[in-house]
Image (tube, rainbow, N blue to C red):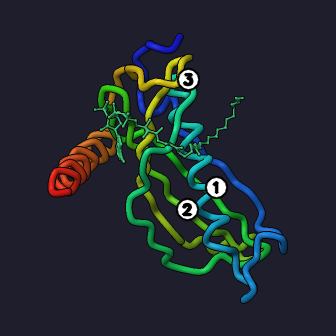
Amino acid sequence: MPNQVKTVSQTRVVLAQVAMPGDANPAGNVHGGTIMKLIDNAAGVVAMRHTRRNVVTASIDRLDFHYPVFVGNLIILKACLNRVGKTSMEVGVRVEAENVMTGEIRHTASAYLTFVALDADGYPTNVPELISETLEDKRRLAEAVERYERRRCTNCRR
Ligand SMILES: CCCCCCCCCCCCCCCC(=O)SCCNC(=O)CCNC(=O)[C@H](O)C(C)(C)COP(=O)(O)OP(=O)(O)OC[C@H]1O[C@@H](n2cnc3c(N)ncnc32)[C@H](O)[C@@H]1OP(=O)(O)O
């Protein structure tokens, strides 16, 4: 049912993956590009669950890595839909790294991604409405609207 209205909680995902030696950069920490791909996948699943359509990543906002992720850490990605436009959606992703031996969890990165839903011919198509139910959902929506306005202003100056 592609056009069915959905709540934020209906599409949120938590993905977890153990960081393996093959994920490491030459310094032995997890490669930033590996984390970026996981972020794109987690956010993409949320956008697909909301639309039940093919989606493409249109943009990724500034991405800061606060702490290194080490091989053996459990990488946990928490993603949810913040805002929908006409054919686009903003998904927020929080990345945590858990040391499974000690239980220590560190917030290592956050990112905001915009996805566009495509119809069967590959053209942008309308996305379902989003219901922001909780106070947290509403705060995220308000912040997403601010980011959308900022992006629009930046694009206008080009
Ligand atoms: C076999 C199946 C199994 C499936 C089960 C597995 C599930 C596993 C899931 C994994 C999920 C992975 C997810 C990875 C997804 C990729 O990796 S996609 C690859 C990288 N991305 C691309 O190649 C996209 C290339 N770009 C494009 O195709 C086009 O520029 C776009 C993004 C479709 C936009 O097209 P356009 O003609 O510019 O569209 P336009 O009508 O002007 O704008 C449409 C909307 O996009 C917005 N927009 C356009 N550009 C931007 C921008 N730069 N920034 C923000 N918003 C923008 C507009 O504001 C507008 O928003 P609305 O007002 O409608 O809400």
Image side of residue 20 versus residue 63, left or right: right
Q: At x 44% / y 13%, what residue is drawn?
A: 3
- Report whether the residue tagged 2 is closer than 8 Å to ligand 1: no
Res. 53 mark: 3
Res. 28 mark: none
Pointers 2 and 1 in contact (C-beta within 8 Å): yes
Instruction: Report the amino acid beneath label 3.
Output: Arg
Mark 2–mark 3 Cα distance, whole angstroms, equals 25 Å
Dot 1: few (<14), some (14–19), or many (≥20) neighbours within 10 Å?
many
- Asked which secondary structure carries label 2, the reply is strand
Name, please, the residue furthest toward the front. Answer: 158
Dot 2: few (<14), some (14–19), or many (≥20) neighbours within 10 Å?
many
Instruction: Report the amino acid beneath label 1.
Output: Leu
The percent position of residue 96, horizontal first and vertical second, equals 58, 65
Which quarter of the rendered picture does the C terminus lie within?
bottom left
Discs 1/3, front: 3
Pointers 2 and 3 in contact (C-beta within 8 Å): no
Work out whether 27 lies above or below 102: below
Mark closest to the chain's N terminus, 1 or 3: 1
Q: Quadrant of residue 20?
A: bottom right
- Report whether the residue tagged 3 is closer than 8 Å to ligand 1: no
Image side of residue 119 versus residue 143, left or right: right
Instruction: Report the amino acid beneath label 2.
Output: Val
Q: Which residue is mark 2?
A: 95
Work out whether 99 lies above or below 5: below
